Image (spheres, rainbow, N blue to C red):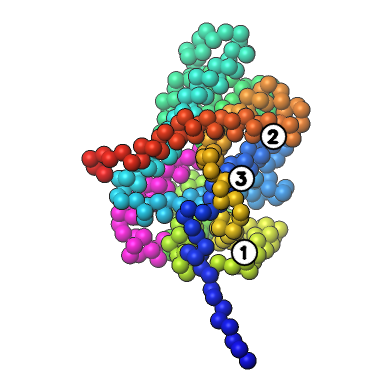
């Protein structure tokens, strides 16, 4: 009897930095956030994922973003010549597009609504409630402290006051960039990468305890009074682990199907939040390396612009009453307008900023 050796394929074998579906997945996830927010911003009911209170469509998209980010940011650090250049690249990726979005919101979106409501722009920059200039100053460094502008969106709209409720995740993203930089400087990724695994499991245990006893996470570590910090860090670290151990993670269809089954079963039995940090990353990375959309970003990566511009677009169109035409019309028009803005953002802001990556500063 002849025995044939079975060749085991690992994640590292499937990963091609130049040929993958990360751009497609990020765009799909950004679109899912738009779909999710259309429910609340259009007044169409709950955003719960398949009607289950454990997760929303937007929440699923956000944790998936952080999984992919953990993988890609870890790779970025290991392939960058210095920690300063790594941070410079991260700053160029997140801040120019973000600052432009703040300016567009204050100088174009909000004035249009103000003009529509008042018939003039007199006093716009002098408003006492949610002053436009204060919106810029207090939100400048990613932490969103003011959501409203000039007391607009306070009536005749399903979700009042907020101009852009999607930006809150960006401060966590940048904090994790800094965290990666610190770990890298300490040599964790090269010599002590098991620490990342232990940290992931430790944080997952805290999160599990917090599910059983709400509020206990902040008693264990006061910093986790912000439960989103704990949750998103767990998923970010999961992505990091997939990069760090890509030579040891078996990559095949059977584990992909098993991961889907685990997610589905846990979802129906209310254990989704405990299982997802383990099973969801495998699903995402299988899709990243198996789907046929490797040329999706041929003309650019529009996912970031779609994510940061969709919310104000949805609010403005709801203000104009588009949501009264029904969910499908509202969603399709919202995402179309947001995609147009994301293309403009990429072409005129993000892409030119990214060209500065090669700038050589003295401290780099």
Residue 161: x, y in percent?
Answer: 59, 25
Would you name the residue on which mark 1 appears?
A: 256
**Where in the figure is residue 98, as x and y percent of width and height?**
46, 33
Range shown magenta: 168-196
Whichever of labels 2 and 3 marks the residue nearer the N terminus, that label is 3
- Work out whether mark 1 precedes mark 3 in sequence or the reverse, and give the earlier one: 3
Residue furthest toward the left?
A: 362
Point 42% across, 33% down: residue: 352
Q: Quadrant of the C terminus?
A: top left
Q: CA distance from mark 2 to mark 3?
A: 14 Å
Query: Which residue position holds label 3?
Result: 28
Residue 181 left/right relative to 36? left
Q: Is residue 186 magenta?
A: yes
Lower position in the chain sequence, tag 2 or tag 1:
1
Q: Residue at x 61, y 54 (%)?
A: 292
Decide if residue 39 is in sight here.
Answer: yes
Q: Is label 1 in a helix, a strand or a loop?
A: helix
Whole-percent x, y for residue 182 in the image: 33, 51
Mark 1–mark 3 distance (CA, rounded to whole Å): 19 Å
Local secondary structure at mark 2: helix
Q: Could you say which is closer to the camera, residue 289 or residue 203?
A: 289
Q: Is residue 132 above or below residue 270?
A: above
Cβ atoms under marks 2 and 3 closer than 8 Å: no
């Amino acid at each position: 009897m002849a025995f044939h050796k079975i060749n085991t394929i690992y994640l590292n074998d499937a990963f091609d930095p130049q040929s993958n579906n990360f751009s497609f997945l990020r765009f799909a996830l950004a679109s899912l956030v738009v779909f999710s927010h259309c429910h609340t911003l259009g007044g169409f009911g709950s955003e719960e994922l398949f009607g289950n209170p454990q997760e929303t469509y937007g929440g699923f998209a956000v944790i998936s973003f952080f999984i992919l980010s953990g993988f890609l940011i870890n790779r970025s650090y290991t392939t960058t010549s210095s920690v300063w250049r790594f941070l410079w690249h991260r700053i160029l990726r997140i801040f120019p597009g973000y600052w432009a979005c703040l300016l567009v919101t204050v100088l174009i979106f909000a004035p249009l609504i103000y003009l529509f409501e008042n018939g003039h722009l007199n006093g716009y920059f002098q408003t006492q409630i949610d002053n436009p200039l204060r919106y810029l100053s207090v939100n400048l460094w990613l932490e969103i402290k003011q959501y409203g502008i000039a007391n607009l969106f306070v009536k005749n709209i399903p979700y009042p006051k907020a101009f852009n409720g999607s930006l809150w995740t960006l401060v966590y993203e940048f904090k994790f960039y800094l965290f990666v930089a610190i770990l890298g400087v300490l040599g964790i990724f090269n010599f002590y990468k098991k620490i990342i695994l232990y940290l992931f499991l430790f944080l997952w245990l805290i999160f599990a305890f917090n599910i059983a006893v709400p509020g206990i996470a902040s008693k264990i570590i006061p910093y986790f009074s912000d439960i989103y910090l704990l949750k998103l860090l767990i998923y970010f670290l999961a992505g990091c682990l997939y990069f760090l151990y890509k030579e040891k993670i078996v990559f095949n269809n059977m584990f992909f199907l098993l991961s889907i089954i685990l997610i589905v079963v846990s979802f129906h039995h209310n254990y989704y939040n405990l299982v997802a940090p383990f099973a969801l990353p495998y699903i995402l990375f299988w899709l990243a390396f198996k789907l046929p959309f490797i040329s999706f970003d041929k003309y650019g990566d529009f996912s970031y612009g779609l994510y940061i511009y969709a919310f104000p677009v949805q609010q403005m169109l709801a203000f104009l009453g588009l949501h009264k035409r029904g969910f499908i019309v509202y969603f399709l028009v919202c995402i179309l307008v947001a995609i147009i803005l994301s293309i403009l953002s990429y072409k005129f802001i993000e892409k030119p900023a990214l060209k500065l990556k090669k700038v050589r500063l003295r401290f780099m």
